[in-house]
């Protein structure tokens, strides 16, 4: 967030965003920050941006966030 606010980060070459431990990051209160970063990345990269979320647990609210930020045909894979 600090780099975005200072204007010293360039998302133009970004192709993929990977968020590991998505459930923990969001549970710890980073939801708004993550949404701002993803929105800025999508704004700069348009539809070419790939967003990948990894999570050990997939509660319904994680599924909601995935639906909101990922492409409509995203795939959820359960390794359990």
Image (cartoon, helix red, strand yellow):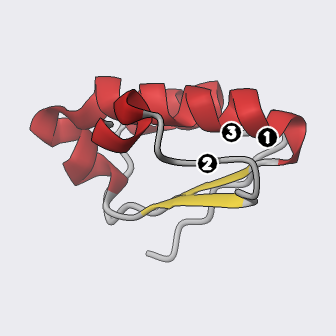
**Between 69 and 13, which is closer to the camera in this rendering?**
13
Q: Is 47 on the left-hand or right-hand side of 35?
A: right
Disc on the earlier residue, 3 or 2: 2
The mark lying in front, picked from 2 and 1, is: 2
The mark lying in front, picked from 3 and 2, is: 2
The circle on residue 10 is 2
Q: Mark 3 and mark 1 in contact (Cβ < 8 Å)?
A: no
Q: Which residue is mark 1?
A: 45
Quarter of the image where the N terminus is located: top left
Q: Residues within 10 Å of mark 1 (few under 14, many from 20)?
A: some
Secondary structure at numbered mark 3:
loop
The residue at 61%/65% (across/down) is 77
Distance from the alpha carbon under mark 3 to that under mark 2: 21 Å
The mark lying in front, picked from 1 and 3, is: 1
The circle on residue 67 is none
Q: Is residue 41 above or below residue 51?
A: above
Q: Is 49 on the left-hand or right-hand side of 9?
A: right
Q: Is residue 75 above or below residue 60?
A: below
Disc on the earlier residue, 2 or 1: 2
Q: Which residue is mark 3?
A: 70
Distance from the alpha carbon under mark 1 to that under mark 3: 13 Å
The residue at 39%/64% (across/down) is 20
The residue at 59%/29% (across/down) is 40
Q: Is 66 on the left-hand or right-hand side of 60?
A: right
- The answer to whether any part of residue 61 appears in the image is no
Secondary structure at numbered mark 2:
loop
Secondary structure at numbered mark 1:
helix
Q: Residues within 10 Å of mark 2 (few under 14, many from 20)?
A: few
Question: Where residue 57 sits in the image (x, y, percent)?
Answer: 32, 57
Q: Is residue 3 above or below residue 54?
A: above
């Amino acid at each position: 967030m600090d780099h975005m606010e200072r204007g010293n980060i360039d998302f133009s070459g970004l192709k993929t965003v990977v968020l590991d431990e998505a459930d923990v990051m969001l549970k710890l209160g980073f939801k708004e920050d993550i949404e701002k970063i993803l929105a800025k990345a999508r704004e700069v990269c348009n539809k070419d941006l790939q967003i990948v979320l990894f999570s050990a647990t997939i509660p319904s609210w994680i599924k909601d966030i995935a639906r909101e930020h990922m492409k409509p045909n995203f795939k959820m894979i359960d390794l359990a």
